[in-house]
Amino acid sequence: MVCCKACYSLKIPGTWLEFSDLESSVSHFVTESIEWNSEIGKNTSNLILKQLDPQKFRVNIGCEGDYQGLLLDANLKTEVQIKFQVCQTCSRLAGGYYEAILQVRTKRKEILNKAVEEIYNLIDSGPSEFFTTESGPVRGGYDFQLSSTDKARTISRDLMVKYGGHVTETNTLVGRKDGRDLLRHTFGVRLPSIGVSDYLFLDDKVWKVLRIDRRRTKLIMLSSPFHQKMVEVDTLRNAPLLDSPLEVQVISHRNSEYLLLDPFTLQTVEAISPKDWKGNNVLALRYGIETYFVWD
Ligand SMILES: [Zn+2]
């Protein structure tokens, strides 16, 4: 059998099969090599492996099968000689191979951290031929060298759908192979500095970000008359973002008249809930020296 010496993948015609260790790779090879009579049903095989040296295993195989209602068994013994090579994935990884560069840019650190963590999760949970040879923080964002252009494109698109922003794709010619141009793709993903559920201060009011659709965002005003509006994300560049809201303790209430404890000043405040308010959470946001209550 031919096996990758770095990752124990087994070479089969046309591709490499992944295994977590050498024994699993050998077991698969042996099991697949057993030739069964075509009239045998319910066939099972049990393997006992013994490693004789780094490239040799002795294998005992207990075989059982049903032949026209008769249970038959047989014991086989064999030795497997392993020839080690390096699979395509491992040789690319060792050679620093990459097809695409993914550049994530945003002015907001929390959003960058979230996006970077998501990209690493996608790489870790993806097939082994999808990997990053080099990645790390750069000024204004984070760069990944990736082994697959298609995956880099999918990730860029998914980030844009989730966070808004936009993607640019550029190519550079890096050589020729078999008469074809070899291109390296660079995906520049620019994410906005606001995210869904952020609170911001605009025109003397507190607004909440309901959703982001590429370069546009839908906001709702958190006080009467609770307007909603779509705006270009870029126009919010100078709108102050507010810290996460704190929960407010309701001291007492009668109908729509409430006595609240301001969590920032620890003073009691009289407030009127919005008409027909049926929520059960009151939140508080601070901007400057003012506390804003949100009837959630
Ligand atoms: Zn390998």
Image (cartoon, rainbow, N blue to C red):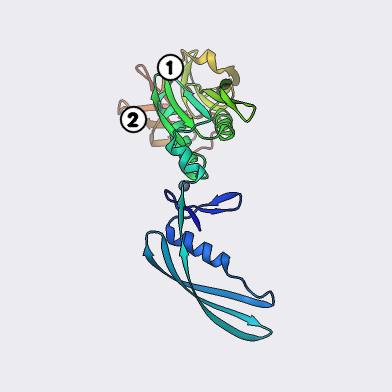
Which residue is nearer to you in this view: 202 or 95? 95
> Which of pointers 2 and 1 indicates the residue nearer the eye?
1
- 102 and 262: which one is in front? 102
User: Residue drawn at (41%, 22%), measured in percent from left and top?
Assistant: 242
Q: Could you classify mark 2 by the number of other residues whose Cα lies within 10 Å: few (under 14), some (14-19), or many (20 or more)?
A: some
Secondary structure beneath dot 2 equals: loop
Q: Which residue is mark 1?
A: 240
Residue 157 location in percent, x, y? 58, 30
Question: Which dot marks residue 263?
Answer: 2
Task: Provide residue 117's location: percent of width, then percent of height.
Answer: 43, 35
- Is the C-beta of the residue carrying label 2 under 8 Å from the nearest atom of ligand 1? no
Residue under the point 56% across and 35% down: 151
Q: Amino acid at mark 1?
A: Pro
Q: Position of residue 141 (x, y in %)?
A: 43, 23
- Outermost residue on the left side: it is 266
Farthest residue toward the bottom?
70
